[in-house]
Amino acid sequence: GAGVSQSPRYKVAKRGQDVALRCDPISGHVSLFWYQQALGQGPEFLTYFQNEAQLDKSGLPSDRFFAERPEGSVSTLKIQRTQQEDSAVYLCASSVPAVSSGRAVPGTDTQYFGPGTRLTVL
Amino acid sequence: AQKITQTQPGMFVQEKEAVTLDCTYDTSDPSYGLFWYKQPSSGEMIFLIYQGSYDQQNATEGRYSLNFQKARKSANLVISASQLGDSAMYFCAMREPGNKLVFGAGTILRVKS
């Protein structure tokens, strides 16, 4: 089946511009995550949705960062007034817990990642 | 405090040989999950293998196995019979309460022909 898709794959913005990054999760995946990956480093958590509810936004670096998932499927990460330090790869992941005897098993989620959006702020 | 430590910035391995990538973790939560992901130069993050903290046996997935030593808080990835296509960055990650992943700094693996 189709994996997680993200668009655009590459985005160049001038400092001060607003950008919107889109994520299409795997169909049926309840949970959706955004991560930021700086060059040469591991990804860092930004925010987490379960269906349309944003359960954790503790990783968003400033109030210029905003994420939404209004219908519990597609998500958009918006960055306002971009700064050079926002340059990074933004990764989206979706997950669903394993099911046993017809019930979701807590703590068994595996996150599957999209190809990322490489944002360059000039 | 760093929760995932990957001490090997880079590793070389000869094609067809096995290689171990190290990962140690720090948590006080009795329930946690450990993951390994592969990131080729193209950038996508590919899930390789998962180990739950209560799993009695080490996880295996094809040529990948996870050497889980709970008392030492280590979760090393073993790749057997290395292939040229295994050349990539490898990340160890731990799932925290709330489901978010915390990643290590990664290890670059280069397979030599």
Image: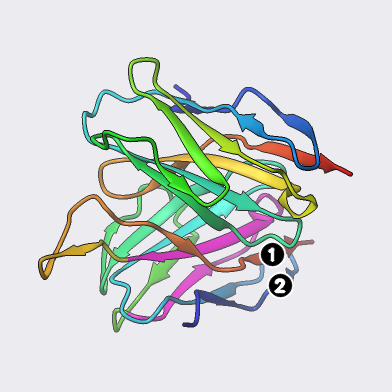
State the image coordinates of residue A99 (x, y, percent, origin top left): 20, 65
On whether disc 1 and disc 2 are found on a single subunit, the reply is: yes
State the residue in front, B85 or B15.
B15
Residue sitting at x 26%, y 42%: B97
State the residue in front, A74 or B90.
B90
Chain letter behind tag 2: A
State the residue in front, A86 or A93.
A93
Of the image marks 1 and 2, the number of the one nearer the N terminus = 2
Q: Is residue A79 magenta?
A: yes
SS for dot 1: strand
Read off the residue under disc 2.
A11
Q: CA distance from mark 1 to mark 2?
A: 6 Å
* Residue type beneath disc 1: Arg
SS for dot 2: strand
Residue sitting at x 18%, y 53%: A106
Identity of the residue furthest to the top in this view: B72
In which quadrant of the rendered image does the C terminus of chain A lie? bottom right
Tell me how the rendering is colored: rainbow
State the residue in front, B33 or B51.
B51
Q: Is residue A58 visible?
A: yes
* Residue type beneath disc 2: Lys
- How packed mark 2 is, by other alpha carbons closer than 10 Å (few <14, some 14-19, many 20 or more), is some
Stretch in magenta: A73-95
Left or right: B67 as drawn, with respect to A72:
right
Read off the residue under disc 1.
A118
State the image coordinates of residue A113 (x, y, percent, origin top left): 51, 63
